[in-house]
Image (cartoon, rainbow, N blue to C red):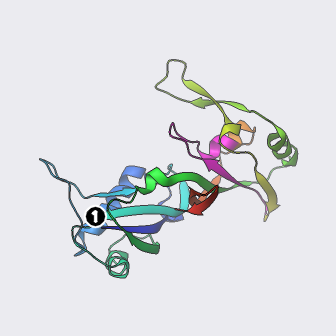
Amino acid sequence: MKVRMQITKDPEIRFVSHLDYLRAIERGLRRTDLPVAYSEGFNPHMKFSLASALGVGVVSYAEFVEIEMAEPVSAEEAVEQLRNSLPKGIRILAADVAANNEPALMAKAALTEYEVSVPAGGQDLLDKVTNFNNAKTLIYKKPAPKRREGYKEVDIKRYLDSVEYKRENGNDVFRFEIKIFEDGSLKAVDVLTAMGIDCSMADVRRLGIYRENHGGMLRV
């Protein structure tokens, strides 16, 4: 069986790398008495994974960890034990259980929801947002250090149709949803950078990860 939990990456640990975030969860699991399953072989490791990797500097209230158990355990017991073992900055928001033959959460993820705030400048960005929403394509040279050219051209509009915008408490606030495909996805800052918006002081927050469901979307 598997225990699935919705957890956070709070502001105080936003600059922790994805690998260190995974290590923090693993150490938390080791401090519990939960019957976590291990892989076989010369170097066995705990069987757990996240639904989607998160970029450094991004806050998230929608990380989803999936933990395979060697013995049955209730979601409530798993939460009770792990909650006291995780470091500050990782909170458990919800949990449930699933069979081992259920598709992995990563395989279900189809859409991510973001909110990005940047300090408001003298320029009204409504025109840039309107132009983006009305455009059919927007080619962006995405940095790709491993490529000979140093970049990869992507059509931003393949990944999202529109961006919501408002000015609030001295910040320009953007909200949008990015699609996930088998060949990858986009970072939230890629979207705004392609629109010509300075993201050097951006506060990026992931609000949700969703899966397809009969033509609609449900939270993973």
Answer whether residue 126 is magenta in the image.
no
95 or 150: nearer the viewer: 95
Query: Can you say whether 154 is above or below 41 in the image?
Result: above
Q: Quadrant of the N terminus?
A: bottom left
Q: Residues within 10 Å of mark 1 (few under 14, many from 20)?
A: few
163 or 159: nearer the viewer: 159
Residue 52 in sight: no
Residue identified by numbered label 1: 27
Q: Total of numbered circles in the picture?
A: 1
Residue at 40%, 67% in the rendered image:
4
Residue at 50%, 40% in the rendered image:
182
Describe residue 137's horizontal placement relative to residue 38 as left or right.
right
Residue at 24%, 66% in the rendered image:
36
Query: Can you say whether 76 is above or below 70 in the image?
Result: below
Q: Where is residue 85? Give x, y as percent.
A: 32, 74
Q: Where is residue 35? Give x, y as percent.
A: 22, 71
Q: Where is residue 215? Give x, y as percent.
A: 64, 55
Q: Which residues are magenta?
A: 170-191
Extreme-left residue of the structure: 42
Image quadrant of residue 190?
Answer: top right
Image quadrant of residue 90?
Answer: bottom left
Q: Secondary structure at mark 1?
A: helix
Image quadrant of residue 214?
Answer: bottom right
Describe residue 102's horizontal placement relative to residue 181 as left or right.
left
Q: Where is residue 216? Give x, y as percent.
A: 64, 58
Residue type pointed to by label 1: Arg
Residue 55 in sight: yes
Describe residue 4's horizontal placement relative to residue 189 as left or right.
left
Extreme-front residue of the structure: 214
Residue at 50%, 50% in the rendered image:
56
Extreme-top residue of the structure: 148
